[in-house]
Amino acid sequence: NVLDQMETPEGNWRVLDNIATPYAWHRLLIPEKCWEEESLRTLGGSRQIANALTLAGRTMKKEYMTERACIGIHVGWHAGQNVWHPHYHLVKPYESTAQGDQLFLHGTEATEIVRTGNFSIFCGGYMTGQCQIIPTDTEWKPFCEQSVDENMELGTAIARLISIFNKSFVSTQGILPDFRLGFQIENGFLMRGIYTPILNQLGFDADIAAVERTPYVLAWTHESTAAHLRGE
């Protein structure tokens, strides 16, 4: 069921209703044409990332869901992608009660790897290699009001982030890392993005940590990830 369409120079996008979901509101943002492997691994580049974010904002505004939402995409089987056609998920999330103070969600000079005029990207989170994408401009416009051109700064920063990881963590067989990318919208504004490369599998201790709300055990530190990405 096609709910909306958006034409772009890079190709058309569609908005579909996802009926196989535990969420009360769940939309799929899908390019009309399937992408080649290389394009999928880079999310089509900065312009296509900006297109997806803009379509998400337009959909939220059109369906009166502008206050709170999550946007995400899975790339690769190990990251949760089970349909090879690229697609973003746009959902109204459950209310959260989790505390993030111990999950390394605050960047430092040692963990920051990408900075633009309005965004800081640093290694941090509950999984090895995970990165937080944080707006730094307090005067940033509401998410649903952003145009494609205005989303290009974020799209370019994310494209750079993906490129750095693809070059730094390519396997000896030439395989690029699977990854997830998600964004959190609160009170109408982009609060954070989270990039999660699948660099190692979680063990049973991660299941216990999730229940007990204790820190996860990382395969190596976030400072080590950042240093490796910087070539140090």
Image (cartoon, helix red, strand yellow):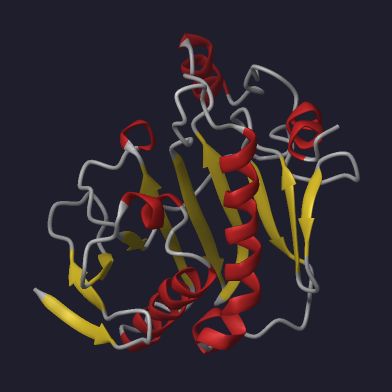
Residue 226, horizontal then vertical, whole percent: 77, 37
21 relative to 79 in the view: left or right: left
Q: Residue at 82% of width from left, 40% of height from top?
A: 111
Query: Among all residues in the image, which is located at the extreme right?
Result: 109
Residue 231, horizontal then vertical, whole percent: 80, 35
Q: Is 39 placed above or below 64 here?
A: above
Number of marks: 0
Please tell me in which quadrant of the rendered image residue 7 appears: bottom left
Residue 33, horizontal then vertical, whole percent: 21, 69
Q: Is 6 placed above or below 176 here?
A: below
Q: Is 34 placed above or below 77 here?
A: below
Query: Among all residues in the image, which is located at the extreme top?
Result: 204
Please tell me in which quadrant of the rendered image residue 128 appears: top right
Residue 146 visible, this orientation: no
Q: Is 139 placed above or below 22 here?
A: below
Q: Residue at 74% of width from left, 38% of height from top?
A: 229
206 relative to 178 in the view: left or right: right
Q: Quadrant of the N terminus?
A: bottom left
Q: Quadrant of the C terminus?
A: top right
Q: Which of 90/179 is in front?
A: 179
Residue 72 visible, this orientation: yes
Q: Residue at 66% of width from left, 40% of height from top?
A: 100
Q: Residue at 46% of width from left, 10% of height from top?
A: 204
42 relative to 195 in the view: left or right: left
Query: Among all residues in the image, which is located at the extreme left?
Result: 1
Please tell me in which quadrant of the rendered image residue 15 appears: bottom left
Residue 69, horizontal then vertical, whole percent: 44, 65
Q: Which of 164/195 is in front?
A: 164
